Amino acid sequence: MAKRLAVVDVERCVDCLLCAQACARRFGEGGLARSAIAVRSAGGVERGFVVVVCRACDDPPCLHACPVGAIEKGPVGVRVVLDRCIGCKACVAACTIGAVRWDEGGGKPVICVHCGLCARFCPYGVLALEEVEGG
Amino acid sequence: MDRLLPRVLRVDLTRKRSWVEERPDLFRDRLGGTGAAIELLHELCPEGADPLGPENPIVFAVGALSALYPLASKTVALFKSPHTGNLGESHCGGRTAFALRLAGYGALAIEGRSDVPVYLSIHDGGVRFRDARTLWGMGSSVTVGRILRDVEPGSGHRTILRIGRAGERGVTYAAAIAETYRHFGRLGLGAVLGSKNLKAIVVSGQGAIPVAEMGRYQKLYRELHERAVRSDLMKKYHELGTAQNVGPLNEMGALPVRNLQATRYPEEPAFSGERLAQGYLGRRLACAGCPVACIHLAALREPHPEEPYFYKTTFVSYDHEPLYALGAMLGVEEAAGVLKLIDAVGHVGLDAMTAGVVLAWATEAFDTGLITERETGGVRPRWGDVAVYREMVRRIADRDSEFYRVLGEGVRAAAARYGGAEFALHFGGNEMPGYHTGPGALLTYLAGARHSHLDSAGYAVDQDLLRRGEELAPPDLARRLLAEEARRQVLSSLVICFFARGLYDFPTIAACLGALGDDWDEGRLRNLGAEVLRRKHAFKVREGFRLATLPIPERAMTTPAPGGAVDEEYLRQALAEMERWLEGNDGLEG
Ligand code: SF4
Ligand code: SF4
Ligand code: SF4
């Protein structure tokens, strides 16, 4: 059964960035360069946070925007075919919620693959994998 | 060791120049943090430097584990302190360590003085000197943060450090504020930044950090994460935060109240951790890379002075130390009052702890007639009178008259000018922290590098001995404190949060470094700790510090701690032992 990463209780987010770090470790490195998830304050930390991550659109604008077909539908969400990508950032502009992150070093997009590793390291249950409806 | 960590970003404000210097020696042999920063300070700070002169450098440093392992989330700042005239060391959480490390630097060293107010904007490997004349003199440090948030890039992975009015005007215990609720509080970093005409520093970075052995690293990370998340450490710091200490300290008679005239309130103070959590807690926050989230924000709701049914909701971060200093020390009775004072102090950018002890001294000096309304400008300081204290905070930050100017240099200066040395609660010029537990705590304040409770946890040793009904001979206590202090130099070189000290024993640290490709063992770590401690002491001695002749505040001796009044002779003997060790070269038992 396919599962999608969801932000289930953003009120409990404490801005520790452990989720973003966990995501980056998928690539065998520390830091945040290729993390697909971002946490930002909602206008000052006292207002709380927003967790920006791919929502796995049914009909993904990022995919349609790509001029060379480097973004394909995945089991959930999308997959970036890196050697087809020409680094034009059209996907970045197309995703309304800003979930396409940019790897400056590699000059390529980074998009969540809904693996849920981040959720395992969130100490406060902000993130979880959810069944995709009808999936 | 990865090739990014040894990069030291050097900034010369006078010439508006910046460059990167590779210092693999410091980061390989010293791991970074305090260990690296003290060497840079020895190199960059000329002997006898004026702390508020352009020659005083500021060194920020992170360590080999920063942004890689849980709770390695702090940044250390070293400088010559304008408050004590000696070594200044301050630690801060927030996002500073993350941002510096992911920007590709192990340290940032700032020298010189700008001709006009500027702020530094450090992104994508570039350093820009930006005009800060509009920000200079702004009423609140919170507003400054808000403006920079809007005009600077890097949202989500940046740090915004800034000073308030107190720092601009050279109050010697002005703080630097990170992310609104985190502080480089002690020893006057804010004043040093102010003296350089440097209003703020914004750093962002989201680089990758190479890891030598990913499998080992992942496994260790997972284990440490699990332990941090499941341990009591996490639970107690997350739930009530350090404010949980207020109640128990009060109960055991170790909470300094009204300038340490007393050590407890008759009942649990209204600002104890439990009572604040029930009545005020609004949100919790974490430093980047820390699962504990001990930062507690109270939501303080105040009615508008004129408009009915209008409220102002202010968020105020509280911790044990500000609650002690701006609550207990001043005899404040209600929780909202303490929160208001913490807020006032944060707005102008003063160190909360020092400010509280200064106001407490002023209150007692007023009570005993050493100062009158002539000095205070018509203000009548009175225990628990929050409105008056708020007014005094404003005047101290503005350096409004001769009296407030002197108060802006701490209780040592105030007592030298107006008398009352016997109740001026400072240790080597630095004001007392919030634990009157016994000789261990007092020795920590006297001999620690920061004269702070976090140096060697003397307060914890005191409580441990009390529980066991034991007493230690002065040299034994001295060695026990030194051993812990030496161990903490390793933690502060890696800049691991001291709350995680139970998580990171030497074998664990060696394993963490091993996964990064660095070969360390317990013995080598132990030596490093002792060496860093001695290097700090050498800097202090160079700048005129003498342990043997350090004045000990009489009040700390006459007001009994839970185990009874502390004997000066006992402290002197322990200090002599510490000095012998710090200036010699024999080892310590772990
Ligand atoms: S990256 Fe954005 S546009 Fe693409 S699938 Fe995810 S949410 Fe939709
Ligand atoms: S689900 Fe996986 S890919 Fe997506 S943000 Fe989390 S860790 Fe990254
Ligand atoms: S790990 Fe959880 S609490 Fe921490 S920043 Fe991510 S979502 Fe927020």
Image (cartoon, coloured by chain):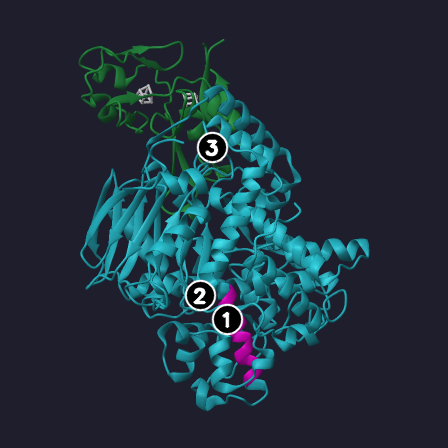
Chain colours: A green, B cyan
Nearer the observer, B420 or B401: B420
**Assess mark 3: CB under 8 A from ligand 3?**
yes
Nearer the observer, B340 or B534: B534
Residue B491 in the figure: left or right of residue B188: right
Q: Chain of mark 3?
A: A
Magenta residues, as a range? B353-365
Instruction: Give the SS element for disc 3.
Output: helix
Of the residues tagged 2 and 1, which is closer to the observer? 2
Q: Chain of mark 1?
A: B
- Cα gap from disc 3 to disc 1, whole angstroms: 39 Å
Q: Residues within 10 Å of mark 2 (few under 14, many from 20)?
A: many
Q: Which residue is mark 3?
A: A18
Instruction: Give the SS element for disc 1.
Output: loop
Q: Chain of mark 2?
A: B
Instruction: Residue type at mark 3: give it.
Output: Leu
Would residue B359 be counted in the magenta stretch? yes
Residue A85 in the figure: left or right of residue B355: left
Q: Is residue B343 visible?
A: no
Q: Which residue is mark 1?
A: B429
Question: Could you tell me if the residues under marks 2 and 1 are in contact, i.e. CB atoms within 8 Å?
Answer: yes
Residue B544 in the figure: left or right of residue B331: left
Instruction: Residue type at mark 1: give it.
Output: Gly
Looking at the image, tell me whether mark 2 or mark 1 is earlier in sequence order. 2
Instruction: Residue type at mark 2: give it.
Output: Asn
Locate the N terminus of chain B and report the quarter of the image it occupies: top left
Residue B414 vs B576, above or below: the answer is: below
Q: Which residue is mark 2?
A: B86
Q: How many marks?
A: 3
Residue B87 horizontal/vertical position (percent): 44, 61
Locate the C terminus of chain B and report the quarter of the image it occupies: top right
